[in-house]
Amino acid sequence: MSILIDNIGELVTNDPGLGDGPLGVINGAALVAEDTGVAWVGSAEHAPPADERVDAAGRAVLPGFVDSHSHLVFAGDRAAEFAARMAGEPYTGGGIRTTVAATRAAPDGELLDTATRLRAEALRQGTTTIEVKSGYGLNVADETRLLRAAFEVTPETTFLGAHLVPDEYADRPDDYVALVCGEMLQAALPYANWVDVFCERGAFDADQSRAVLSAGLKAGLSARVHANQLSAGPGVQLAVELGAASADHCTHLTDDDVAALAGAETVATLLPGAEFSTRSPYPDARRLIDAGATVALASDCNPGSSYTSSMPFCIALAVREMRMTPAEAVWAATAGGARALRREDVGALRPDGRADLLILDAPSYVHLAYRPGVPLVHRIMHNGVIR
Ligand code: NIG
Ligand code: FE
């Protein structure tokens, strides 16, 4: 079964070999999808025939968003905490405990319903690939059931048992780290391909974070790190040292941190929804990009620090508040996310890649930032199926 999308005003391929500039833009383009993959892209006048034709009517087409950082499995609501912040309270990460209590009390079905609903919400806004973390269970049984639910909604799942030390381990945090590195990790393995740690004052220090990440790596997982969100701590350096795919947040960086990211494969994943929702200073994307670091954008969708599943919103914030160009922001939300997940098959539209794309109700990708808050996704193709 093949589908020709014809009459594309502006096609973003993210392959500079296929079109203009770093986004590999082709104007007046067409694309053919066959089964779950892209079979052909190019100028509309050279398009081969296909079983079905979709007329894009001059709209822009781009790769589906790759959201490489989310926490979709949880219970409860922290709107009151958000309102208190907007009235002047600071964000400390301590609210994670509120969500842990609600999540532990929730049945499996409720957790899966929430994750499924948020996954569908993200897809409607153009997210065709998403990573989902555990981290609101913080004991063996609950972390395992969170990961099981996560694994039902996406193949990109992350074990975040080291999100916070739970209250019952408050006076013996190293025992908790040992549990995470031992029994909890073993229980997580069937449902996770990534290991993550919240490396931050009040969460896990450098040694504890190193222990968790090393145990995960040894067990065959790949690493990603919540790094330098609330302070300029050791997270970024640790991520680079251990060859993590991504250092996430990167809000407070020293010159050494920027230099380390610039010389590494580790992607700097920026989560502007968190700064928006905690009323914090945004990460300095310009400094990272100008230094040569690879930057991704992700939603950090979670009930505390960033309750948005909208990648278009993150793009608009990155452009307006973080001085990224629209092209840089769109690249970061697609190809950048793919790099952060070490995926070659998503984040670009080229032959042999996955047929994951969106047709925007706009003539150009620039509209994602130019028309903030407007639902611009006209149609989505996910795994070759158009809806
Ligand atoms: O990525 N920083 C740690 N974890 C989440 C916040 C979780 C929460 O507040 O519930 C984050 O922002
Ligand atoms: Fe997070």
Image: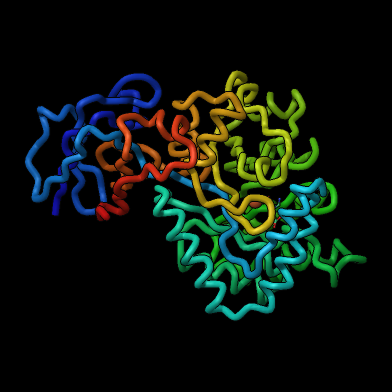
Quadrant in which the N terminus is drawn: bottom left
The residue depicted at 74 percent of the width and 72 percent of the height is 101
Horizontal side, residue 298 vs residue 82: left or right: left
Residue at the image position 20 percent from the left and 26 percent from the top = 28
> How was this image coloured?
rainbow
Look at the picture and state if 95 lies above or below 184: above
Answer with left or right where residue 9 lies relative to residue 242.
left
Residue 213 point in image, percent of width and height: 69, 52
Give coordinates of residue 95: x percent, y percent. Answer: 76, 59
User: Quarter-wise, where is residue 177 in the image?
Assistant: bottom right
Q: Quadrant of the rendered structure where residue 275 is?
A: top right
Residue located 68% across and 28% down the image = 260
Q: Give the side of residue 239 with respect to residue 365, left or right.
A: right
Residue 289 sits above or below residue 52 on the image: above
Q: Is residue 74 above or below residue 110?
A: above
Q: How many dots with numbers?
A: 0
Q: Quadrant of residue 106?
A: bottom right
- In this view, the residue farthest toward the front is 87
Looking at the picture, tell me which residue is in the foreground, 363 or 205: 363
Q: Is residue 350 left or right of residue 80?
A: left
For residue 46, above or below residue 280: above
Q: Position of residue 170 (x, y in %)?
A: 88, 65
Front in this rendered view, residue 102 or 157: 102
What's the residue at 43%, 60% (across, down)?
A: 120
Residue 323 visible at all: yes
Q: Position of residue 368 (x, y in %)?
A: 43, 35
